[in-house]
Amino acid sequence: MEKRVQFSSRWLPYVLVAPQIAVTLVFFFWPALQALYWSVLLQDAFASKTHFVWFDNFKALFQDSVYISSFKVTALFSALVALSGLAISLLLAVFADRVLRGARAYKALLVWPYAVAPAVAGVLWMFLLSPSIGVIAYALRSHGVDWNYYVHSGQALLLVVVAAVWNQISYNFLFFLAGLQAIPASLVEAAAIDGAGPFKRFWTIVFPLLSPTTFFLLVVNVVYAFFNTFAIIDSTTQGGPAQATQILVYKVYQDGVQAFDLGGSSAQSVILILIVIALTVLQFRYVERKVQY
Amino acid sequence: MSKKGMTIALLAAGMLAAGSAQAVTEIQWWHSMGGALGDKVNEIAQKFNASQSEYKVVPVYKGQYDESMTAAIAAYRAGNPPGILQVFEVGTATMMAAHGAIMPVYKLMAEQHEKFNPKDYLPAVTSYFSDTHGNLLSMPFNSSTQVLYINKDAFEKAGLNPNQPPKTWPELVKDAEKLKAAGVPCAFTTGWQSWVQLESFSAWHNVPFATLQNGFGGLGTRLEFNGPVQVMHIQNLANMAKKGLFTYAGRKDEPTGKFQSGECAMETTSSGSYANIKATAKFAFAVGPLPYYPSVKGAPQNTIIGGATLWVMTQKNPDVYKGIAKFFTFLSSPEIQLDWHKSTGYVPITLAAYELAKKEGLYQERAGFDTAIKELTNKPPTPNSRGLRLGNFVQIRNVIDEELESVWSGQKTAKQALDEAVKRGNELLVRFQKANE
């Protein structure tokens, strides 16, 4: 079926997309090109002296063990956020799909955390878990747990993962729920008549049919963990202790905004741009195609 | 985004207001004093504005120190910098290297024929912000130093003399052991670990933190805080942490929360926390000087300051310079300084204000309130205790924080961590040198 709209005028379509293109150019392409340009410069904060240094900023990055470890932290962090986030929200969605009474209230409550800004989510969890003032921290200590995420890197990572997952669950939940409701009931009923139990039905019918949604959410969650968790980290651990929660985006901020190393942080931004491009290509090539099942 | 929108709206509102008040030269003062401190800043500006009619100082809170500095750099690059910018001490080298962006205070005062004698100011404060020829580059404003706070009630409970805070580190360890034995959950903690336990610690023991007189001698400076004295101290703290005598509670001021709640019995942190602790602590507390090691020759020397100074940014309109010079004279007057000292806990920056405070009997009334100023003026500053002038200092502090954290968690020894911090920090210094040469 031909879905394309035909314009009789030659210039009208260009006029219609012009505002969108203008916004994209000014707010996306310009800063990106600026970052690309700055990434090959070495300059002081006030730009009173600027040297062109070719790829020195990139070379310095990949010789820096801290930057490499930041890559590892980011990989671990996003894997934890994406996998546990997906698992929990899938579980919730499956339950919500079966609820008959009060389903609306239940769903509405599950969507609430999404309305909370990441910075607030971070502060919220910090109030619960802060070693100085946290309520849960107090309870943990009275049970003999040495809770102090300023020292123990595992605890710090746990804190930011929990806050990040909690903040993202609603989004995943909505998509999973929609995906579940799109699965024809006849398939599941047929399997039930054939004698398949709930677990069998889920793993052999529901889960495979849900895979496009799952894959889409996986990409979205990885991107979320990479880029949108900045506020959570900034309001809780600030990348510490000893870089245990210093993800790539946070390092860009620390080097560029706090320390005025514009060349170095621009080089890091360029690398992040490449990562996003790779993720986008992955999504378009594999996910979008498989949607047509 | 919305924050930016707000700022633009506020700026626009400010411009409209400025347009209506003709013939008054407006001076933008970007600062980072939040809460009660911000109210005090507004009060000072109002007093100055009321004292004359030609100039109007407009204080604008621009977020934390790093945020206001970033904002000012962006404003400078866009060609519209504020008149006065409050910059924290670690930003000093960056500001100094910014040729063409700043107007040194000594030059400003001379050009505007404002009466100005650097000798009126505390030497420990001015030495941090002077060039190698002794010319003052920025105006001292809020300066603090490191002190030891003790919980007197906890000391009494542990059978210790509550009027005698430990003077040396060995004494502090002994007191910590007794406190722990008496059931205090956290005997000792520290705020601002890099500033207290390495930067000022080195000055206090008259050992270098970096080569070329701690960086005052030029951009070729390299770190050397991995000397035997610093390694001994950090290892000592690590051993305390292992025995549960030292609790690490964060890089900045978070540990003060643990002292205020009564959980920690001793804390080394900024003298600027005095007002805050006094307002919230439900126990009696005392203030003592930073402990030292009697085994180190020449200790105690003098501590170094923290806090911020006011930098004058290059202006197109020469009238603004005149107004800033007048404002600085007003700001340095003993009455303003004494009031600032009393209400904030920052040290008075002029000797006259200090004398006035003594005459008023302020230090009889508040015991220990003069600890900071006594530490700063303990001995005339040496090349090891004048202060620090390091490029990329914000990043270097991050590196130090990270490496120290790996010591407290037992992953590295003091020697390993300090060696690594020096190595990583020097890479940052090399970068700064390259960018500024």
Image: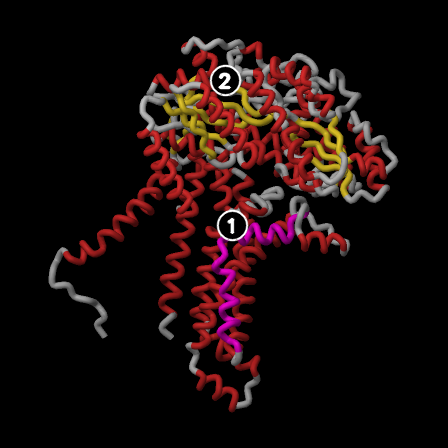
Tell me if I can see residue B206 in this picture: no
**Image position of A154 with respect to B63: above or below:** below
Q: Quadrant of residue B239?
A: top right
Say which residue label 1 marks: A119
Chain letter of disc 2 in the image: B
Q: Which mark is residue B330?
A: 2
Horizontal side of B126 relative to B101 (left or right) equals right
**Tag 2 secondary structure:** helix
For the C terminus of chain A, give its image quadrant. Answer: bottom left
Badge 2 crowding class, 10 Å Cα cut-off, few under 14, some 14 to 19, many 20 or more, is some
Q: Position of residue B60 (x, y in %)?
A: 45, 32
Q: Which residues are magenta?
A: A102-131
Horizontal side of A265 relative to B9 (left or right) equals right
For the N terminus of chain A, give its image quadrant. Answer: bottom left
**Tag 1 secondary structure:** helix
Q: Nearer the viewer, residue B104 or B286?
A: B286
Q: Which mark is residue B374?
A: none
> Looking at numbered disc 1 in the image, what kind of residue is underneath it?
Ala
Give the residue at x 62% y 43%: A241
Give the residue at x 52% y 67%: A109
Q: Position of residue B137 (x, y in %)?
A: 49, 17
**Which of the two discs, 1 and 2, sits closer to the camera?**
2
Q: Position of residue B330 (x, y in %)?
A: 50, 17
Q: Nearer the viewer, residue B401 or B417?
A: B401
Is residue A281 located in the magenta-colored stretch of the structure? no
**Image position of A264 with respect to A145: above or below:** above
Tell me if I can see residue A251 in this picture: yes
